[in-house]
Amino acid sequence: MSYVKSIRILHKCSGCGKKMHFINTGKFRVNANGNKVDVWLIYQCEKCKHSLNLTIYERVKSTRIPQEEYQLFLDNDEELAALYGNDKSFLKRNKVEFGR
């Protein structure tokens, strides 16, 4: 699997049982329930590969997400994944620490 160049983060890994470095997979998870949509950026523990989903959109009407951006989520666009993965305000909203 290839990873996207972005900020490494620190978070407690449920697989390792301790705080570990996570890296951006360049993949998004999109879940639709009726007219509400959730979108996450997927990170993965460097050691055990457990995943961590960082929230981009949570329970928003699909019409509130720009159609072009929504399609990029569905296409797992690596440039968009890198944009979010290097956005410190996005990472702070998801309560993760910045890795070294």
Image (cartoon, rainbow, N blue to C red):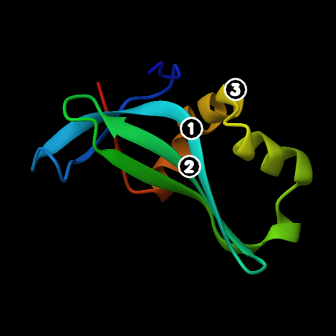
Residue type, mark 1 in image: Lys
Residue type, mark 2 in image: Phe
Marking on residue 98: none
Q: Marks 2 and 3, how far apart in space?
A: 16 Å
Q: Which residue is mark 3?
A: 79
- Is residue 11 shown above or below 62? above
Q: Which residue is mark 2?
A: 90
Q: Quadrant of residue 99?
A: top left
Could you tell me if residue 37 is visible in this image? Answer: yes
Classify 10 Å Cα crowding around label 1: few (below 14), some (14-19), many (20 and above): many
Q: Identify the mark nearer the N-term, 2 or 3.
A: 3
Q: Which residue is mark 1?
A: 27
Classify 10 Å Cα crowding around label 3: few (below 14), some (14-19), many (20 and above): few
Q: Identify the mark nearer the N-term, 2 or 1.
A: 1
Q: Residue at x 16, y 44 (%)?
A: 19
Pinpoint residue 80: horizontal percent, then vertical percent: 70, 34
Pinpoint residue 61: horizontal percent, then vertical percent: 79, 75
